[in-house]
Structures are given as structure tokens and as C-alpha cells.
Amino acid sequence: MRQLAEAIQNEVRTFVLDKTGLPGKFDIDLAYESEDSFSKAETDFPTIYGALQDQLGLKLERQTAPVEILVVDHMEKKPTEN
């Protein structure tokens, strides 16, 4: 489920935390229409949010949670030897 959370994170462009508690590996087939799709044609595919709930029984919920962040406050170019 961690890999699914990472894949969803790339699609929705926000941090996704796996809170399912499901260990192990799963073979998942998820059909959805990307929100970045430039297709003008109407499709029968749902958004990723609808697909997760309808096809897998999973739901994305917006919550606040502590997240580790690396902050670089200073950087210098290393001198080269001439």
C-alpha cells in the first residue's frame, strides 16, 4: 500500500500517507482519468478520487500530519584547486 500511496502522491501532487495498515504486496488495476489530461473527448473514467473509492474501497481524506522536511539554509560553492 505504501507504493500505491506514492503513486497517488505523484498524481494529486500532495503528500499521501498510507493509513490502511495493510501489509504485503497487492496487484492493483486502477482505471481513472488523469486531471492533467488534455483530451477533449468525454470518457467514462472517474477521477482518481472516485476510482479509489469505487474500485478499491479506499478514500483520500485531507488531514494535517507531521512531515519530515529537510531545510537547507546556507550553501557555498566548494573552491577548486588550480
Image: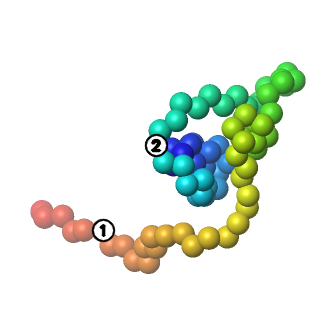
For image coordinates 57% across by 73% down, the residue present is: 66
For image coordinates 51% across by 44% down, the residue present is: 3
Left or right, 66 with respect to 35, comes to left
Q: Quadrant of residue 44?
A: top right
Mark 2 is on which residue type?
Answer: Gly
For image coordinates 52% across by 35% down, the residue present is: 26
- Split into 4 quadrants, where in the image is the N terminus? top right
The spot of residue 12 in percent (x, y) is: 68, 48
Residue 5 - label: none
- The front one of 43 and 74 is 43
Color style of the picture: rainbow
- Split into 4 quadrants, where in the image is the C terminus? bottom left
- Label 2: which secondary element: loop
For image coordinates 69% across by 38% down, the residue present is: 56
The residue labelled by disc 2 is: 24
Residue 6 at least partly seen: no
Q: Quadrant of residue 30?
A: top right
The spot of residue 6 in percent (x, y) is: 54, 47
Of labels 2 and 1, the one closer to you: 2
- Label 1: which secondary element: loop
The residue labelled by disc 1 is: 77
Q: Is 18 placed above or below 57 here?
A: below
Q: Earlier in the sequence, mark 2 or mark 1?
A: 2
Mark 1 is on which residue type?
Answer: Lys
The spot of residue 23 in percent (x, y) is: 48, 48
Task: Tell me if mark 1 has few (under 14), some (14-19) or many (20+) residues whose alpha carbon lies within 10 angstroms of its own.
Answer: few
Residue extending farthest left: 82
Task: Tell me if mark 2 has few (under 14), some (14-19) or many (20+) residues whose alpha carbon lies within 10 angstroms of its own.
Answer: few
Residue extending farthest right: 42
